[in-house]
Image: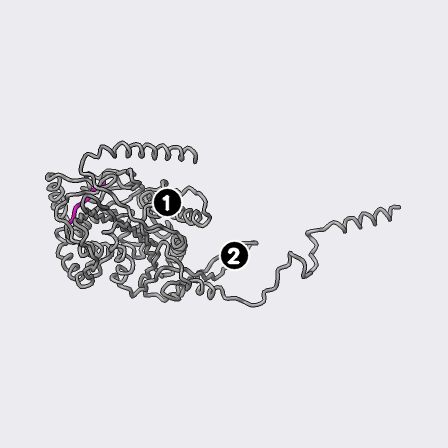
């Protein structure tokens, strides 16, 4: 009897499946992994996919910084693809394993170390400047690790002018700019200035140019080179009448916005506002009326004197803030017109405390820079996920001053063309920072933006009929933002 009970228990236990005992190697077993038939080189598949023509989204360009050391980490496969080979360490089961991981990144175009400033300007900026008189907005971002060449690409030197001086020179070759500031960009459009206000604007620019007077000879040498590089536009602008060019220069330092064109003793924190048309702007930022490329360059140099620059363990003249130089063109045609702007943004580089060895105020600056860049990365990830999945998602534009200003361009709702120039230092000690930069560039490459023209009608009267509707729209926007914030909380 006991033997029979023991045999029954033993039989029942064997009928219960166990996850400890190995499963029989049956072909029909769904838990068995099928044997690969043939090895496949994934990099070859990526190269084939990159050759397929796809519609351009956000244009992302890569610029390689010259390096004297031999480079075994980065390999440029074509003018649009880059392969990285980085050592990655993984930990598990009580041991550390080091792997060599290869990844491929695609760009709109890759500029090698031998590329000139002229080639970058003609590829990245020139075509967008041609659309400026027609009301098309454009935003350019320079992004990269600290010391990778962002400021050099944007500002340049006397011997190699950057994108900002070339843009200023080309704008005044593109159109016949007005010599008196009859119209000025304002909230919701443009406002007409009186004769006294026009004279004040001209005298104010004249006083501001005294700051950059010692560097005027350098500009003349640089301008002679730009005259040879740039050609006059062949666009038919006969139907246009007046063009008013205004420039502004602001920086975002420790999550506070400052006007670089105001005297240092009068600098105060500025606030971001949104007008009735949905345009985001910096309230109180100085708008300088310029009549030539020389005047515009003097204004830019005067603003550069107020930029916050300090030495770190990585770079001797490291930018401690994000700066945005804006060129606004107001076009008047028979009482109706449009205004459009070009924003050239020099983003401060992402930093690691171990590499920069920052302490005190420098550490606080690094913390603010990295925090704003992290919010920018989150916005790009959310935008890509929102566009791919076609679902509503809250993009955290308002968590940083930088993304608040750039949100209209990145979201595509304001019809801005957006481009990004990613600078890369191929030195091995910058490999960790460069890996993060390339990952963000890959996300930005997938974001889709619209390209529309925004037209504004000039109002020379008191605009009584539009004040009520504009105030009502602002009230509704404020109420919407308050309810949205309460919902998040």
| Foreground of the two, 290 or 3 | 290
Determine the residue positioned at 40% across, 43% down. Answer: 395
**Can you see residue 277?**
yes
CB atoms of marks 2 and 1 within 8 Å: no
Sort mark 1 into few (<14), some (14-19) or many (20+) by Cα contacts within 10 Å: some
Alpha carbon separation for disc pair 2 and 1: 31 Å
Percent across and percent down for residue 334 are 18, 45
Judging from the image, the colouring scheme is one colour
Closer to the chain start, of discs 2 and 1, is 2
Magenta residue check for 453: no
| Foreground of the two, 387 or 29 | 387
Determine the residue positioned at 34% across, 54% down. Answer: 144
Percent across and percent down for residue 176 are 15, 53
Occupied quadrant, residue 46: bottom left
Helix, strand or loop under label 2: strand
Percent across and percent down for residue 220 are 14, 58
Percent across and percent down for residue 470 are 28, 34
Residue 371, disc: 1
Question: Along the horizontal axis of the image, is 220 left or right of 67?
Answer: left
Magenta residue check for 289: yes
| Foreground of the two, 133 or 114 | 133
Q: Looking at the image, is mark 2 or mark 1 nearer the viewer?
A: 1
Compared with residue 232, is residue 207 higher up or lower down, i.e. above or below? above
Position of the C terminus, as image quadrant, is: top left
Sort mark 2 into few (<14), some (14-19) or many (20+) by Cα contacts within 10 Å: few
**Can you see residue 432?**
no
Helix, strand or loop under label 1: helix
Which residue reaches farthest right? 1
Residue 96, disc: 2
Question: Along the horizontal axis of the image, is 94 left or right of 171?
Answer: right
Compared with residue 297, is residue 271 higher up or lower down, i.e. above or below? above
Give the extent of the magenta segment: 285-290
């Amino acid at each position: 009897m006991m033997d029979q009970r023991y045999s029954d228990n033993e039989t029942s236990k064997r009928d219960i499946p166990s996850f400890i005992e190995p499963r029989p190697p049956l072909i029909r077993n769904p838990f068995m992994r099928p044997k690969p038939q043939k090895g496949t080189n994934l990099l070859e598949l990526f190269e084939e996919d990159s050759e397929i023509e796809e519609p351009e989204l956000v244009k992302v360009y890569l610029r390689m910084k010259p390096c004297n050391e031999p480079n075994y980490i980065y390999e440029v496969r074509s003018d649009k693809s880059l392969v990285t080979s980085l050592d990655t360490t993984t930990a598990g089961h009580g041991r550390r394993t080091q792997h060599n991981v290869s990844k491929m990144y695609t760009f709109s175009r890759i500029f090698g170390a031998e590329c000139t400033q002229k080639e970058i300007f003609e590829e990245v900026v020139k075509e967008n400047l041609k659309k400026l008189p027609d009301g098309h907005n454009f935003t350019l971002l320079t992004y990269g690790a600290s010391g990778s060449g962002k400021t050099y690409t944007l500002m340049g030197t006397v011997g190699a002018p950057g994108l900002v001086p070339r843009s200023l020179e080309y704008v005044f070759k593109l159109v016949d700019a007005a010599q008196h500031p009859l119209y000025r960009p304002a909230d919701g459009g443009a406002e007409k200035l009186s004769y006294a206000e026009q004279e004040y604007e001209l005298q104010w620019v004249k006083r501001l140019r005294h700051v950059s007077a010692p560097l005027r000879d350098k500009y003349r040498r640089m301008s002679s080179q730009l005259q040879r590089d740039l050609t006059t536009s062949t666009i038919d602008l006969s139907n246009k009448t007046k063009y008013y060019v205004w420039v502004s220069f602001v920086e975002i330092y420790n999550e506070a916005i400052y006007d670089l064109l105001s005297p240092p003793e009068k600098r105060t924190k500025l606030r971001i506002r949104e007008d009735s048309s949905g345009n985001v702007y910096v309230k109180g930022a100085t708008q300088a009326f310029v009549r030539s490329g020389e005047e515009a360059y003097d204004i830019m140099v005067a603003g550069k004197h107020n930029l916050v620059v300090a030495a770190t363990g990585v770079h001797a003249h490291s930018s401690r803030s994000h700066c945005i130089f804006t060129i606004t063109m107001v076009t008047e045609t028979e009482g109706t017109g449009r205004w459009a702007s070009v924003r050239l943004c020099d983003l401060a580089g992402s930093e690691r405390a171990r590499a920069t060895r920052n302490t005190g105020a420098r550490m606080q600056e690094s913390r603010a820079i990295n925090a704003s860049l992290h919010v920018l990365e989150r916005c790009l990830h959310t935008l890509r996920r929102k566009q791919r999945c076609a679902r509503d998602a809250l993009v955290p534009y308002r968590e940083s001053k930088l993304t608040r200003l750039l949100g209209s361009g990145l979201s595509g709702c304001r019809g801005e063309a957006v481009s990004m120039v990613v600078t890369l230092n191929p030195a091995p000690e910058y490999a960790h920072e460069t890996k993060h930069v390339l990952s963000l560039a890959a996300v930005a490459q997938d974001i889709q933006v619209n390209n529309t023209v925004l037209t504004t009608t000039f109002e020379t009267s008191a605009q009584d009929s539009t004040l009520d509707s504009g105030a009502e729209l602002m009230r509704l926007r404020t109420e919407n933002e308050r309810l949205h914030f309460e919902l998040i909380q």
